[in-house]
Image (tube, rainbow, N blue to C red):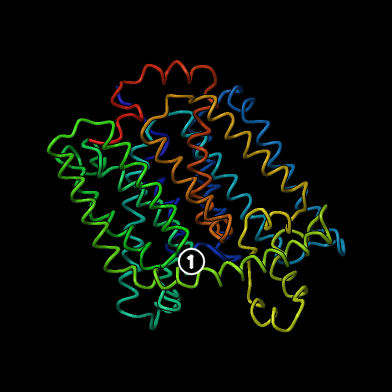
Amino acid sequence: MSEQPLLPDYVLAVILSLGMAVRGFDSTAGQAMSCIANAAMLVWLLHRAALDMDFWRRASPVLALIFTAMGWGLLASLQFDGSLPDYVPGKLLSLLSGLAALLCGAIIGHRSHRLKGILDWLLLINCLILLGGLVVRQIGTDGMLSYWTIEREDRFTGLIGNANVTAAMAGCFAIIAFARLTDLRGAPVWAGDWRPGHIINLPMFVISFGVVMLTAARLTAVLLGIILTLFALHWLLRRTIFVYTRLTAIIAGITIATLILAFAGILFERFGVLGTAYQNRVMNWSHLAGVVSESPTYGYGLGAFSTINAHSLSTPRYAQANWTLNSAHNIILQLMLQGGWPYLVAICGAAALIVKQTISALRNHWSRDEAIIAAILCLIMGNAMIDVVLDMPAPVTIFLFLSGLLWGRALQGPKVDVALSRRHPMHDIGTIGG
């Protein structure tokens, strides 16, 4: 008998992707919308899943660290005059939204193994969102379409309104599309049993990879190139070369080469000024590290970056270049600025526990879809070290939900190792490829 899903995959994908079409939920109203959507999804899953105490016992160390971080962040926000600034509630809603997304992923990962359908629907819906952004870019942003800023300095910014964040998320979907394209069993669940259904993923790969090129995001282009190369090498070196495999390899290679030649002009131009951009970013980090050193224990409170940046502009030249800066463009510095080192330690401790539990549970039994998710998380985290992708609620929701899917395997306890060791060999990571 087939497993009854806690929530249909397409419904999950729509809820998780809402912010990708609404400027990343990057506003107080957007943070509230994100929190409402994720909280509603969590309440439904808690109602349907009927989780036992073992789940909460295994999750409790991580949750304790997360709640400790949130409590410390609130305390840090009260340190100056004893009242909460008006920007704190929005940030608190964003944190609660992220926690809800993490728990939703954990519950689904704990109760089911249906990763393929979730990834397939996420890919389809977000490619449609990316395509919608390309259409809006083509027809212009007059009238009601002025809500979106689709292009800045000739770089495509998508419906999110930020080129680098759009690139990072498009790169995630390019990974899914490429992995499906190079798998003879990669037909999306919504495509039925049509063969060879994996070719359906080609237009979605064109959209997502093409968007990465149009955004001219250097780091995403490099990280994505590395990840796709590793997937391709693993696929080609470990599989018997069938006719379909040769054909798919040729199609994928021609597609990537064509997209690079067609759209990468501005990307190559930006690589030409990489040295200057790097110096500016290091200067910003050095300045903000000095700001952190003035309040290393408490930071400056949740959501306080813009205010603190405006008050710490050191010289006229620095002020002219950075007065509009709204993020540290480094997740470590951003956390330190919000709550000091205790806040950073609590968040990093929770993340480390999730990684440890997940690796311990899965060991050498990673499925293909779990490998795709791990690659996506690496791409997003790599971007978060130099950009704002984890400062926006919409990407954070997807990042934490996917993290939760893997973490949910660990929350199954000792049963995980036995169940995964009995998987059919076709589902092992060694089957990357067709």
Q: Position of residue 425 (x, y in %)?
A: 30, 22
- Specify the amino acid type for callout 1: Arg
Image quadrant in which the N terminus is located:
top left
Q: Is residue 103 above or below residue 110?
A: below
**Is 245 placed left or right of 101 in the picture?**
left
Residue lying at 33% horizontally and 39% vertically, measured from the top left: 117
Residue nearest the viewer, comparing 398 with 294: 294
Location of residue 119 (image quadrant): top left
Q: Position of residue 254 (x, y in %)?
A: 21, 56
Residue at the disc numbered 1: 23
Q: Is residue 385 above or below residue 162?
A: above
Residue nearest the viewer, comparing 205 with 149: 205
Q: How many marks?
A: 1
Q: Position of residue 299 (x, y in %)?
A: 78, 57
Image quadrant in which the C terminus is located:
top left
Q: Residues within 10 Å of mark 1 (few under 14, many from 20)?
A: many
Residue lying at 58% horizontally and 55% vertically, measured from the top left: 385
Residue lying at 62% horizontally and 30% vertically, measured from the top left: 59
Q: Outermost residue toward the right?
A: 81
User: Which element type, helix, strand or loop, lies under badge 1?
Assistant: helix
Q: Position of residue 422 (x, y in %)?
A: 37, 16
Q: Outermost residue toward the left?
A: 243
**Is 428 placed left or right of 94 in the picture?**
left
Location of residue 316 (image quadrant): bottom right
Q: Is residue 335 above or below residue 303?
A: above
